[in-house]
């Protein structure tokens, strides 16, 4: 910019009132800090609920599920498995 243009800009009044500029900036910073604090609170609550759900699932899942039985060799219908049908052992 040339010196004349700079002088012309300095003589013009600002297009906005700058009386409340600092107040508006600090209000925006405070609003952003509140939003961040709320987001942290919500994230910690979600993590707590997730941990509680996992622990409850583990506790009640082991308590209600019968022990696994290893009967895959003598399982009913094993003669119809594709591997035995291909080999021809279902006689």
Image (spheres, grey):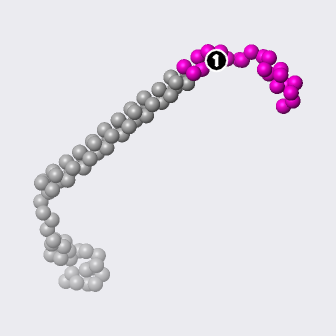
Give coordinates of residue 61: x percent, y percent: 17, 53
Q: Residue at x 87, y 30 (%)?
A: 2
Q: Residue at x 52, y 24 (%)?
A: 26
81 vs 41, nearest the viewer: 41
- Check the picture and name the quadrant holding the N terminus: top right
At numbered mark 1, what does the secondary structure look like: helix, strand or loop?
Answer: loop
Magenta residues span: 1-23
Give coordinates of residue 31: x percent, y percent: 47, 26
Give coordinates of residue 48: x percent, y percent: 28, 42
Task: Tell me, yes or no, whether the highlighted magenta stretch contains residue 37.
Answer: no
- Check the picture and name the quadrant holding the C terminus: bottom left
Q: Residue at x 82, y 25 (%)?
A: 6
Residue that badge 1 annotates: 18
- Figure check: 11 above or below 68: above
Q: Is residue 25 left or right of residue 82?
A: right
9 vs 43, nearest the viewer: 9
Q: Residue at x 30, y 81 (%)?
A: 86
What is the quadrant of residue 78 in the picture? bottom left
44 vs 49, nearest the viewer: 44
Give coordinates of residue 3: x percent, y percent: 86, 27
What is the quadrant of residue 16 in the picture? top right
Q: Is residue 14 left or right of residue 66?
A: right
Q: How many marks?
A: 1
Task: Tell me, yes or no, whether the highlighted magenta stretch contains residue 17.
Answer: yes
Q: Is residue 31 left or right of residue 38?
A: right
Crowd rating for badge 1 (residues with CA inside 10 Å; few <14, some 14–19, many 20+)? few
- Figure check: 30 above or below 46: above
- Figure check: 34 above or below 47: above
């Amino acid at each position: 910019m040339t010196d004349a243009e700079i002088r012309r800009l300095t003589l013009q009044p600002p297009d906005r009132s700058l009386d409340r500029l600092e107040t508006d900036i600090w209000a925006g910073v405070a609003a952003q800090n509140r939003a961040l604090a709320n987001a942290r609170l919500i994230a910690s609550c979600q993590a707590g609920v997730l941990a509680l759900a996992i622990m409850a699932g583990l506790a009640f899942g082991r308590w209600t599920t019968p022990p696994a039985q290893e009967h895959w060799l003598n399982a009913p219908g094993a003669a119809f498995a594709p591997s035995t049908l291909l080999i021809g052992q279902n006689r």
